[in-house]
Amino acid sequence: MGSHRWPCLGVCSGYSRAFGTGAVQLSILACMIFWASSMRAQTTGAAGGNTAAEPLKSAAIPSFQSNVLQAVPNSQAPQSSLGVAGGRGSSSGVVPKLPTDAGQYWEEYDLRPYTKELTSVDRPHQAVIDWVLRETGTDAWFTDPFGFLNADRTTLRVYHNEAMHKIVRGVHERFVNGTMVPQAYGLRMLAIGNPNWRTRALSLMRSVPAQSPGVNAFLVSKENSAMLLALLRGRSDFKELSSADIVVYNGQPQVLEQVRTRNYVREFRRVESSWPPFIPTTGEIQEGYRLQISPLLDRNNKSVDLVVKCHIDQVERLVNVNVDLPLPTGQVYPGQISVPQVASWRLHERFRWPADDVLLLSCGVVAAPQSSPGGTLLGQGTSLIGLDRILPSSGGRADAILLIEYRGDASQGIASTANLVQPPSNPISRGRY
């Protein structure tokens, strides 16, 4: 056996002197192959009585070839059980059986009677999902018992127990068996400097619950609403911003907004190529008003279910601050930045009232209109419901009042369908619930 190995070592030594260490590796590889062939021949001869060497097959050294001569593709590389089980979920390609432990069952609801009329509305079925979630809450679809909710323009698909299906049927009925034509709602925005207007007005309205802090809700009959407006107009601190009729399809959201950008010097950035070596960096604040309403009538148009969402962000003033900017000479360069003083107010609540009454929302003493009628927000005249006049340059305070009245089916004489506003396009909830 030694006669087979020592000549190879001599050859390796000669290769090393002639060609360097790179050739040594190849010579070692050749020696190992030759040695494996010799051992295989001896083993075969001893077992079968034949001392003749057989040709060397590639399968004789599979591990050597795999680890040295070629790289194993990732798809063929062995994976640990931790990487498979802990890093990603398993998938068998077979649809699992849905749980039925709480009496869940599958049901599809036809939405075509409602959506076929809303050809100009993008994703009208989204409003159905929104109102189902408002009735059931979102947790019911993400906790026990197992269930899911899905919809497209033609079908609402629900998998849940009987209690949830009963709620879904009630919402579905209000959409497919309710009114299909656009509806008109009157919006009137008021501002009163002192909240003591309630002293004489409480006898004309009745209070209803409101959950938002600082918000009072009242219902006023249409006859008393005229008397209430006459009473308020007699005050010196009363200001009626504007009133308008808004057209909206049943259940669909309507968004009204007007914002502007206020720029200010936020900080100074060092720039070595200029003198002084600082340039101001500006910041932006979006201030303005955003109002979203989503009304849903019952099947007989006798009651209104309304979700109202209102945001006000107002820059009351910019507080100037002097700063000392160090110079390379050891001196300081005087600069000035501004710190915004912002007043914000939020309302997001749901109300239900008889369609013959008027809903009055007193938002409390908040950032409210105090500017002159000629002062517009963007210098382009007044907006749809006077939203350009609620953000004065100085931060005023007043009791902001919103009156919402159902006016019935819309017509060209009341309001134009051009006022229809598409809902936001953010795919993740969009703050609807």
Image (cartoon, rainbow, N blue to C red):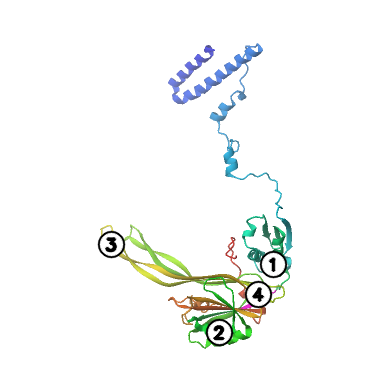
Q: Residues within 10 Å of mark 3 (few under 14, many from 20)?
A: few
Q: Decide if residue 355 is on the left or right side of residue 340.
A: right
Magenta residues, start to end: 181-186
Q: Residues within 10 Å of mark 4 (few under 14, many from 20)?
A: many
Closer to the chain start, of discs 2 and 3, is 2
Amino acid type indicated by mark 3: Val
Q: Earlier in the sequence, mark 4 or mark 2?
A: 2
- Amino acid type, callout 4: Val
Q: Label 1 sits on what residue type?
A: Val
Q: Which residue is mark 3?
A: 332
Residues tagged 4 and 1 counted as in contact (Cβ below 8 A): no
What is the C-alpha distance between the residues marked 1 and 3? 68 Å
Q: Position of residue 296 (x, y in %)?
A: 66, 71
Residue 85: give x, y in percent of width and height. 60, 42
Seen from the viewer's position, the closer of residues 142 and 119 is: 142
The local secondary structure at tag 3 comes to strand
Q: Which residue is mark 1?
A: 171
Residue for badge 2: 201
| CA gap, disc 2 and disc 3 | 61 Å
Q: Residue at x 36, y 69 (%)?
A: 320
Residue 183 part of the magenta segment: yes
